[in-house]
Image (cartoon, rainbow, N blue to C red):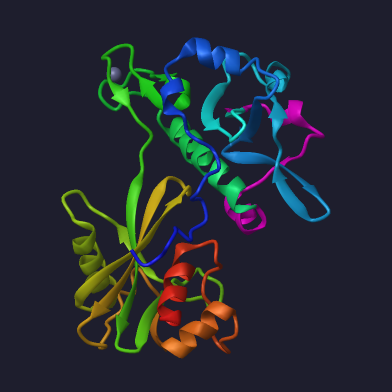
Amino acid sequence: MLSPHNPNAFTRSPLDRAGHHRRDKAWLGAALEAETTLLIPFHQQRPLVTEEGGVVSPGWLGAHARMRIAPPDARLLFLGLDDAGAAHFAIDIDDAAKLEGLGRFDDLRALGPRLSPDDLAILGPAKSVFEWHARNGYCANCGGPTLVVEAGWKRECPACSGEHFPRVDPVCIMVPTFGDRCLLGRQKLWPRGMHSALAGFIEPGEAIEEAVARETLEEAGLIVSHVRMHSTQPWPFPHSLMIGVLCEVEHDRETIDTTELESGRWFTRAEAGLLIAGKHPEAFAPPPFAIAHQLLKTWAEE
Ligand SMILES: [Zn+2]
């Protein structure tokens, strides 16, 4: 690992997940009555936020608000405990009308750079788990309806006793380098000038290094000779784990797969520094919020 600590957004949550409480119904019931407990409402996978003086914050409510804003069977997710021991929950709201005047429900991806690192790390898992619940109401084994258990972290099938856990999809994301240059790609739909790392889902039976080599060859026609792990990032759109890698390649004769990318372009290390600083005359990189930015930054500064 290159980084002394993980540099990525959505990591380093200030909450202790305290997973041992998830099966303790008495503890959870008491926590939902406690004065110190906080609740963050979500509606269609969007968190409630407030904005004051240009500063965006999660719209935390006291636990006592629960019955007023949602039916008793509304889906809850226990997020963890803060340093003072206060429990934090997320609640999935179908009917947003009862929250009128308390803030707005907004898209986490669009909000991302405006929320604090702590807030992103708290909201990210709730976004991923609620999205998983929304798509997994029925048992993949027998087709019967499943029930939410363990404070929102699991679904169980009463018909076949099947157990279902929130999924995480591993994705390798890499910047191929050849000497003092790196290759970045661009997709047709991206804003004009934006270039970023290559990326692809890791397939069953593949090591991370193997997936990096396969994706780099498929997308850019480049043969990987060395893989260096950088850092990882939970990316809640909808529930990926980005595995960031710098990889050296054997040559610089790229062949871009135009079904996936519009184009690829080599940048010198000095140009990579300009991309990161937002000072390149023709191109720009994703914002610091994205692991691609951190990968490129590390390489540019080496
Ligand atoms: Zn089942």
- Quarter of the picture containing the C terminus is bottom left
Depth check: 48 or 30 in front?
30
**Observer able to see residue 186:** no
Tell me: 103 left or right of 291.
right
Identity of the residue furthest to the left in this view: 205
Location of residue 264 in the rendering, given as x and y in whole percent from the top left corner: 38, 81
In which quadrant of this rendering is ligand 1 seen? top left
Depth check: 233 or 30 in front?
30
Location of residue 242 in the rendering, given as x and y in whole percent from the top left corner: 38, 56
Location of residue 122 in the rendering, given as x and y in whole percent from the top left corner: 56, 41
Q: Give the residue drawn at x 38%, y 60%.
A: 231
Location of residue 293 in the rendering, given as x and y in whole percent from the top left corner: 48, 70
Q: Give the residue drawn at x 56%, y 87%.
A: 280
Instruction: Identify the magenta region.
Output: 91-115
What is the quadrant of residue 132 in the picture? top left
**Observer able to see residue 110:** yes
Q: Give the residue drawn at x 64%, y 33%.
A: 40
Q: Give the residue drawn at x 62%, y 34%.
A: 43
Depth check: 81 or 92 in front?
81
The answer to whether 80 is drawn above or below residue 21 in the figure is below
